[in-house]
Image (spheres, rainbow, N blue to C red):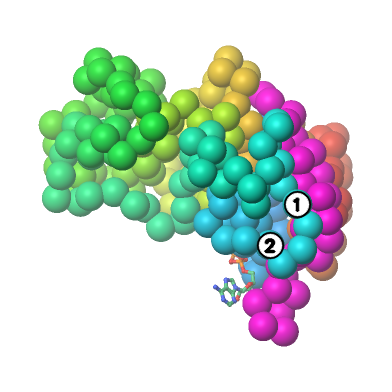
Amino acid sequence: MLKVDSLSKRYAKNQVLHQLSFQIHPGEIIGLVGENGAGKSTLLRLLATIDSPDKGTISLDSLTYGKDKKEIRKHIGFVPQDIAIWDELSVRENMHFFEKLSYQSKSEVQLKQLCLDMNLNKWDEPVKTLSGGMKRKLNLAITLIHDPKVLLLDEPTVGIDLKSKKEIGTYLWKQAKEFNRIIVYTSHDMDEIRELCDRILCIGNDRFYEELLRKSGKEIISV
Ligand SMILES: Nc1ncnc2c1ncn2[C@@H]1O[C@H](COP(=O)(O)OP(=O)(O)OP(=O)(O)O)[C@@H](O)[C@H]1O
C-alpha cells in the first residue's frame, strides 16, 4: 500500500501542497486532477522520490521514503511530462539501454513483448521517426522493464489520437488489474479519467473538477 500522511510542499512563498493524506491499494488506478499549477506534477515528483516534501511522510508497504529511498526506487516507474528517450537510437536500442540501467534483466523477447503489448511494432525504427503517441508508448514500455509496483504517469496521453489513448488506457488497466500495480496518473481529459480510474484525487483550491466529477459516481478523494 502507498500511504501519504500530512504531506506539504512549498516553493519559496508558494505553498503548493498542504497536508495531503491518502492511501492507495495495489491494483488501484488513481486519476490525479486539478487546475494548472494545482501541484499534480509536484505530487508525482514527491511520490517518485525525485523531490522531497517539507513536511509529512510517504511509505510503500514497509518502506519509508526518507529512510529507504534507494530500495523504494526499485519499485517506482515514473513517466514525466517530457518524453525521456534517445531520439537517434531505435526502439530496440532504447529498450536495451534502459534495461541495462534497470534493476532487473530482461531478454530481447521480453523487451519486445513489452512494446508489442501496446501495439508498438517498430522495433528497428529510429525513435525520431516515430509519432508522438508511439514515443509515449515506448516511454511507458521502458518504465515497465523493472516491474514496478507503482506507476506514476504525468499526462501519458496528452496530444495523442483517440485510438492510441484507448490502447494506452486498456494497457494501464491491465497493468493494474492483472499485475496488481498501483497507478497514479494525471490527465486533463475528464472522459478518460471517468472511464479508467477507480478513484479520483482532486487537488488544489479550485473545486471545479470535484464538482464536475462528482456526477461520475466515482469515489473522489478530496484533500
Ligand atoms: N522547481 C520549482 N520551483 C519553483 N516553483 C515550482 C517548481 N515546480 C513547480 N513550481 C510551482 O509549483 C506550482 C505547482 O506546479 P505543478 O507543475 O506541480 O502544477 P500542475 O498541477 O502539474 O500544473 P499543470 O496542470 O500546468 O501541469 C506552480 O505554481 C509552479 O509554478
Q: Residues within 10 Å of mark 1 (few under 14, many from 20)?
A: some
Residue nearer the viewer, 23 or 121? 23
Give the quadrant of the C terminus.
bottom right
Q: Amino acid at mark 2?
A: Pro
Q: Residue at x 81, y 65 (%)?
A: 18
The image shows residue 45 at horizontal and vertical percentages of 57, 56
Q: Residue at x 83, y 56 (%)?
A: 6
Q: Residue at x 68, y 62 (%)?
A: 53
Total labels: the figure holds: 2
Q: Which residue is mark 1?
A: 57
Majority SS type along the magenta span: strand
> Would residue 210 appear left or right of 118 to someone viewing this image?
right
The image shows residue 17 at horizontal and vertical percentages of 75, 65
Mark pair 2, 1: CA separation: 8 Å
Q: What range is drawn magenta here?
A: 1-27
Secondary element under disc 1, as helix, strand or loop, is strand
Q: Residue at x 70, y 73 (%)?
A: 10
The image shows residue 218 at horizontal and vertical percentages of 81, 35
Vertical placement of 3 versus 171: above or below?
Answer: below
Give the quadrant of the N terminus.
top right
Q: Which residue is mark 2?
A: 53
Q: Residues within 10 Å of mark 2 (few under 14, many from 20)?
A: many
* Magenta stretch holds residue 21: yes
The image shows residue 95 at horizontal and vertical percentages of 26, 34
Q: Residue furthest bottom?
A: 13
> Cβ–Cβ below 8 Å for labels 2 and 1?
yes
* Magenta stretch holds residue 137: no
Residue nearer the viewer, 69 or 211? 69
Q: Amino acid at mark 1?
A: Thr
Label 2 beta carbon less than 8 Å to ligand 1: no
